[in-house]
Image (tube, rainbow, N blue to C red):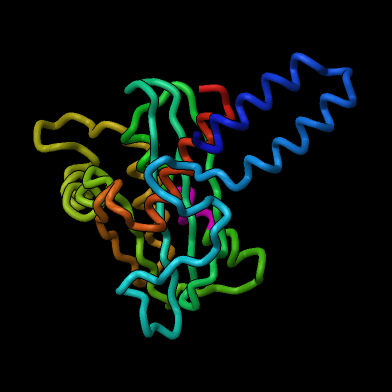
Amino acid sequence: MRKSEYQKIIKKLRALFPDDQTALAALDLLSTKGDSLPESESSSIELQNDHFPLPDEMIGKKAGFAVFADGACRGNPGPGAWATMIQDHNAEIILKSSGVDVPTTNNKMELEGVIRGLKGLIEKWVEEGISDRESPVFIYSDSKYVVEGIEKWVPGWKGRGWKKADNKEPENLLLWKELDQLRQNFNTISFLWVKGHAGHPQNELCDRMANLALDEAGF
C-alpha cells in the first residue's frame, strides 16, 4: 500500500470518530506507523529523503543550482499539480514545494513546476539578501514540451511577436512568457530533459510530490 492511500484511510476513520479520544489516539499511532510506507509502489525512496546525488552537470562546481520540476494531471484537462525541488552545489536541498490547480492540463503543470522552481530560487536569494546571478542554473524536466519549447520554439515565437508560424498564439502563452521573463534573471541557465519514471531520484521525488498533493486535495 502506498503511504498516501494509507493516510486517506486514516483520514476517513478520523471523520467517523470525531469525538472519541481513545479512537483518535489510536489513529494517531497508526498514522505514525504509516510514515514508513513508500509513497510509490515502484520506488523505495521516501519523500523525506534529503540525500540525493548531484547530477553530472553539477559535480565539481564551486557554485550553482539544480532545479528539478514535474507536473501531473488526472484527466487532461482535469485536476493537476506541480512540484519542484532545488539543490545547491553541495547537494543540499534548499527548497521542496508543490501545489494543486483546477482545472488544468499536464503541459500547464509541467511549465508551472519549472516556473515555481525559478521563483523559489529568486525568493531564497531575496530572503538571504544575496544575488547569485553568476552561478549556473540547471533545470531538469521530463517534459520535452518544456525543454524543447523554451530552447527551440520560444525564440521563434518572440521573433514573430509571440506568434507561431501559422500566425496563431502558442498554447499556454502567459506561462511561456512568464518562464521566458524569469530566465532573464540568470546569466547562465540550461534546460535539460530527463527520462520520466526511469529511476532518476529527483524526478521521481517531484513526481511523487505532485501526486501526493493531488491525493491530499482529494483528487
* Rendering coords of residue 46 (x, y %): 52, 52
Q: Residue at x 62, y 64 (%)?
A: 126
Residue 184: give x, y in percent of width and height: 38, 61
Left or right for 177, reference 117: left
Residue 114 in view, yes or no: no
**Rendering quarter of residue 29:** top right
Q: Is residue 117 magenta?
A: yes
- Vertical relation: 8 (above or below) 152: above
Residue at (50%, 42%) from the top-left corner? Answer: 39
Q: How many marks?
A: 0
Q: Residue furthest top?
A: 16
Residue 164 makes an appearance in the image:
yes
Residue at the spot 75% in from the left edge and 14% down from the top edge: 16
210 relative position to 48: left or right = left
Q: Quadrant of residue 80?
A: top left
- Residue at image position (27%, 45%) is 143
Residue 86 lies, in percent from the top left, at: 48, 61
Nearest the viewer among 207 and 181 is 207
Question: In the image shown, does 196 or 193 lie closer to the viewer?
Answer: 196
Whether the magenta-drawn stretch holds residue 75 is answered as no
**For the magenta stretch, what is the residue range?**
115-120
Q: Residue furthest left?
A: 166
Magenta: main secondary structure equals helix
- From what the image shows, is residue 215 above or below residue 89? above
- Please provide percent x and percent y for residue 103: 44, 21
